[in-house]
Image: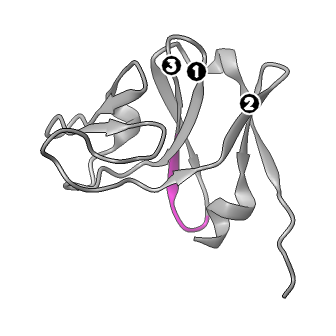
Amino acid sequence: MKQEKDFWFDVGPLNAIPPRGARTVKTPRREIAIFRTASDEVFALENRCPHKGGPLADGIVHGRKVACPLHNWIINLEDGEATGADKGCARSFPVKLENGRIYLDMSVAAAL
């Protein structure tokens, strides 16, 4: 079985995303939200709340969570799981920070 090679896409500099903010990356299959926490961690989730499809990138980031702007579902940025009594999951994607730049693993983002 042939293994796909990682393809890390340079999303841009960390400072292009405000602390506790997000930006989106459009792929052929979906839109992905890249989040920056107040402590400069980065996370990537499909830009779609598991509840009603709200745009997670427009939500409020607090700690390692984001609140969906439509119905205030709280989504964990680490794994995309809804918290509390809410059930559902936004797909998460590998993302890394190197030398002040954000990279998204497009081999995973394009395959799913």
Q: Quadrant of the C terminus?
A: bottom right
Q: Quadrant of the N terminus?
A: bottom right
Q: Earlier along the polypeptide chain: callout 3 or callout 1?
A: 1
Q: Residue at x 67, y 14 (%)?
A: 15
State left or right for residue 36 relative to residue 101: left
Residue 34 lies in what quarter of the image? Answer: top right
- Which residue in the structure is indicated by mark 1? 17
SS state under label 2: strand
User: Which residue is outermost to the bottom?
Assistant: 1
Q: CA distance from mark 2 to mark 1?
A: 9 Å
State left or right for residue 21 relative to residue 89: right
- Marks 3/2 in contact by CB < 8 Å: the verdict is no
Which amino acid, by three-letter code, is at mark 2?
A: Gly
In the rendering, which numbered label is found on residue 12? 2
Query: How far across and how far down the image is residue 29, in percent?
Result: 55, 68
SS state under label 1: loop
Query: How far across and how far down the image is residue 39, in percent?
Result: 55, 11
Give the crowd class for mark 2: few <14, some 14-19, many >=20 residues within 10 Å.
Answer: some
- Marks 2/1 in contact by CB < 8 Å: the verdict is yes
Query: How far across and how far down the image is residue 30, in percent?
Result: 51, 61
* 32 magenta-colored: yes
Q: CA distance from mark 3 to mark 2?
A: 16 Å
Which amino acid, by three-letter code, is at mark 1?
A: Ile
In the rendering, which numbered label is found on residue 37? 3
Q: Earlier along the polypeptide chain: callout 2 or callout 1?
A: 2
Residue 62 lies in what quarter of the image? Answer: top left
Q: CA distance from mark 3 to mark 1?
A: 10 Å
Which amino acid, by three-letter code, is at mark 3?
A: Thr
Q: Magenta residues, as a range? A: 28-33
Query: How far across and how far down the image is residue 108, in percent?
Result: 67, 62
Q: Residue at x 49, y 29 (%)?
A: 22
Give the crowd class for mark 3: few <14, some 14-19, many >=20 residues within 10 Å.
Answer: many
